Amino acid sequence: MQLDNQANATTDNGDEVTYHNNGLAVWTSYSKNGHDENYAWFDLGSGNVTVKNPDNEIINKMIDIAGRLNAKVQGDDGEIYDTKIFTTDKQVTKEKSPWWKIWS
């Protein structure tokens, strides 16, 4: 993990967007870093770590981190993820629930 405190992105219409937070880190070993400007951002705030639209690889990383913090990985609909997902073929997220959190 690399603490960057800032993320930059370009919207579909070419606008540059910057997000600042002192708890923003990127998972540098994520296999899809940089593909289609995609990065695995982990955002710490209010005692929670939030990740937007995680794929199975990111969810597995979240489960690893949660285990070390004695925390849990929980989706927006209250579902708990405590067992690693070993395939990366499918997205686990639902379009209506794009935010995931590690709750302590």
Image (cartoon, rainbow, N blue to C red):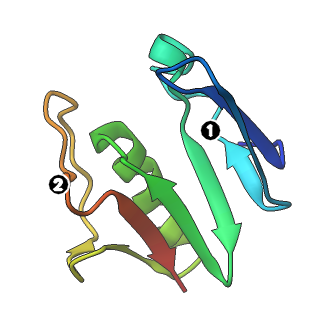
Q: In terms of image quadrants, where is residue 2? A: top right
Quick one: 92 or 11, which is closer to the camera?
11
- Tell me the amino acid under the disc marked 1: Trp
| Above or below 52: residue 37 | above
Q: Residue at x 68, y 83 (%)?
A: 46
Residue 83 or residue 55, whichever sits in front: 55
Q: Position of residue 36 (x, y in %)?
A: 46, 14
How crowded pointer 2 is (Cα within 10 Å; few <14, some 14-19, many 20+) is rated as few
Q: Residues within 10 Å of mark 1 (few under 14, many from 20)?
A: some
Name the quadrant of the C terminus: bottom right
Q: Is 86 positioned to the left or the right of 63 in the image?
A: left
Q: Position of residue 29 (x, y in %)?
A: 59, 27
From the image, tell me which residue sits under label 1: 27
Q: Secondary structure at mark 2?
A: loop
Residue that carries the numbered disc 2 in the rendered image: 94
Q: Position of residue 34 (x, y in %)?
A: 56, 15
Numbered mark located on residue 91 in the image? none
Q: Is residue 91 above or below residue 95?
A: above
